[in-house]
Amino acid sequence: MKRDSTSTQAVARSADRSPEDVVPHCSLTKPTGGEGWARVPDLIRSSSEPLPAPWAELFAPLENGSVDELVVIAQIGQSLDGRIATHSGHSHYINGIAGRAHLHRLRALVDAVVVGVGTVVADDPQLTVRLVPGPNPARVVLDPRGRLPVQARVLSEDGSRRVVVTTTPRPTLPAGIEMMLLQAPDGRIAPATILRGLAQRGFRRILIEGGAATVSGFLAAGCLDRLHVLVAPMIIGAGRSGLALPPIDRIDGALRPPTRVHMIDNEVLFDCDLSARRVRLDAATPAP
């Protein structure tokens, strides 16, 4: 990976920081190949030695939590105009092969990948690591109302743990599925409650993959350490939006996280550091 000295240096700051306390962006050229990648999943878990270039620049922040024992990252892919799908819901694919490989690398680095049941119903994803070398994470589906189809591919038996987060038992689900029963007083299970439950099951690095409502919910609740927004050079027009947060009255109330910028092929990855606003989960110590 080589620093692009011709790029314009931008700055980003947290909403609660003064204008003088700024964090510079790093504009980097990211290779689309897999140079040195094969060792990264093991190294990030063992912390036995620093991650090799070019991967340290992007993935070293996932090695250790800065708030508590957890590292929670979300990823969302979108167009230049902030769309994640057309008006009909078609989204395959907004990001190119290099961008999708980045998502698979994130999967390979975490203990568990989390999606909402709406994503499973709409896309029937596998949530496995196929585009790069690396282990498959546990697959977690948030299903408070019991809508998860029993034939969904995320439930397939392949040696990975499969967890369904819900409010009532689902005896019809396939054998081997772990049920995590949580309270949903307003029809939604609080993100902090979900993270505590996952931590108690031994998951430490967690990827919130989708859909947009799930990612937005974890962001709004202050339950993300980092957010990767991968922007493809595409304009969709009318379509489904990405992040959706509660409205603000003034621009100075907007989130301005410290952000580093990376190039992945012809797409731009914004790596947002949200750790300063991540809530501390005192009960989130992983079970032995």
Image (spheres, rainbow, N blue to C red):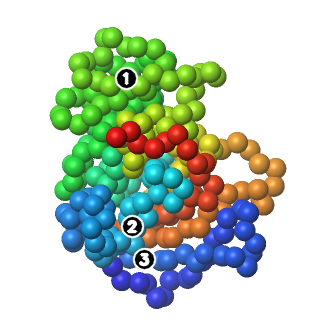
Vertically, is 117 above or below 104? Answer: above
| Secondary structure state at the residue bearing disc 2 | helix
First reached walking from the N terminus: tag 1 or tag 3? 3
Which residue occupies 29% across, 24% down? Answer: 177
Q: Nearer the viewer, mark 2 or mark 3?
A: 2
| Secondary structure state at the residue bearing disc 1 | strand
Question: In the orientation shown, which residue stands out farthest toward the top?
Answer: 171
First reached walking from the N terminus: tag 2 or tag 3? 3
Q: Is residue 129 left or right of residue 111?
A: left
Q: x%, y% of residue 271?
A: 49, 63
Name the image quarter holding the N terminus: bottom left
Q: x%, y% of residue 181?
A: 45, 22
Foreground residue among 68 and 180: 68
- Residue on which disc 2 sits: 60
What type is the residue that disc 3 sits on?
Leu
Foreground residue among 54 and 261: 54
Q: Residues within 10 Å of mark 3 (few under 14, many from 20)?
A: many
Q: Which of marks 1 and 3 is in front?
A: 1
Alpha carbon separation for disc pair 2 and 3? 15 Å
